Image (cartoon, rainbow, N blue to C red):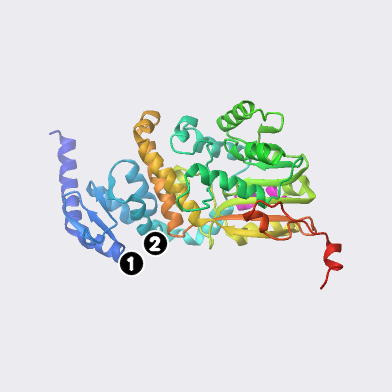
Amino acid sequence: MGLTDSIASTLVTPLEAVVDRLAPGAIERLLAAMGDPPLRVRLWDGREIGRPPAEAAGTACFHDHGVLLRLLVDPEMQFGELWSQGRITVEGDLVAVVEAGLRGGLDHQGPLSQLLPAAEGLLARAIRTDPESARRNAHHHYDLGNDFYAQWLDERMVYTCAYFPEPDASLEEAQLAKMDHVCRKLALRPGQRVLEAGCGWGALALHMARLYGVTVRAYNVAHEQVAYAREQAEKQGLAERVEFVEADYREAREPCDAFVSVGMLEHVGPDHYPDLAAVVDRCLAPDGLGLIHTIGRSRPQRLNRWMATRVFPHAHPPTLREMMDLFEPRDFAVLDIENLRRHYELTARHWLARYEAARERIDALVDPESARVWHLYLAGTAASFAAATVHLYQVVFSRARNDAVPFNRAHLHTDQPPRFVAPREIRRGDL
């Protein structure tokens, strides 16, 4: 043993001894602060603390002394980091374990997390999503390549919340139902022009053109997604009716009868809501309809810091009140709001099951740490919606004085077309 190793040994061994002695009490206090969740913790030396095995949703295994120290200081960031490094593993239901942690507020405990609430508003407003930052953010999330996503998404590569007509519907059926749900809410009719901001791999744009007879211009800054979408448009014979533009949504200038954005607002940031509202205002026809589909919050709260660092840089799920900053300044009227939280939980569970089933292929596509990051991200997504720490909002809107809107919701749930009633029909009716 060299001199450096000898010195390190004399320093580390006493610290480990202290951690060994204090660990059970520290974990018991942490679990108590979380409301005694159905969790069990196994330490590096085999000792177990927490609920009895029969009552525990799962067991979090801490594989070295440093795990506990880092968790006590900053659990919000360090649980994900330690999982990604393989220093924490879970036996049992990973979603249930993460959900129990979220319900107990684990992601907002610890000294560092306690310092952040006062700055949450500033952090939300400071999100950088100018055009260049938006490109970097998209590259960060999608640089693993289309083959990676194809392992666990549905066959059309739809990477947003599905809509399950029945809980036992397949993911493919539910994603088709979601796209129809969006199209019906927009009351699409043949010959209309649709502007889509943030189109993913193009499934919704192609669906609108193929089944609803509209033309679509869709904007996206992710190069691989646009290339894939263009290829699909050619294969499906829709290239003349669907144009995929590799550009920021702020560049849109063309008039449209319907505006749609599914899964993009989370990445816009409150400071840039006026930019998005300006695009809609200059493009949407006087009698047009718009729909925004976004992950959101029931109260203002920043995104989990691990998620924001590792998966979604600069993302911000808005509250409905924050979303009104899109609509009120331009005198847009909100017509319909639906919360699909439970549908997103089920969507994420489908993704997670496919991810776990394809793990061998995924491990061949990405490095081990990235594979663990995405495993936890998908489990955490399902857990977040199950714990209701996030929601999924679909908001339909129009210009305030637009009377060319469906008179009721019958067209959303039947095959009948939307019914439009002119104001004069109301005035001369039997009142």
Helix, strand or loop at label 2? It is: helix
| 311 to 429, vertically: above or below | above
Q: Amino acid at mark 2?
A: Arg
Between 387 and 119, the one nearer to me in the picture: 387
Residue numbers of the magenta segment: 268-277
Q: Amino acid at mark 1?
A: Gly
241 with respect to 365 (left or right):
right
Residue corresponding to mark 1 = 35
Q: Are marks 2 and 1 in contact (CB under 8 Å)?
A: yes
At horizontal 18% and vertical 50% (from top left) the residue drawn is 16
Magenta stretch, main secondary structure, is helix
Residue corresponding to mark 2 = 103
Place of residue 99 in the rendered image (x, y in percent of width and height, measured from the top left): 38, 56
Place of residue 281 in the rendered image (x, y in percent of width and height, measured from the top left): 76, 49
Helix, strand or loop at label 1? It is: loop
- Assess disc 1: are there few (<14), some (14-19) or many (≥20) residues with their C-alpha within 10 Å of its C-alpha: some
Between 260 and 82, the one nearer to me in the picture: 260
| 312 to 146, vertically: above or below | below
How far apart marks 2 and 1 lie (CA) works out to: 9 Å
Disc with the residue nearer the chain's start (2 vs 1): 1
Residue 414 visible to an observer of this rendering:
yes
Is 274 a magenta residue? yes
390 with respect to 222 (left or right):
left
Give the position of the N terminus as an image quadrant.
top left
Is 211 a magenta residue? no
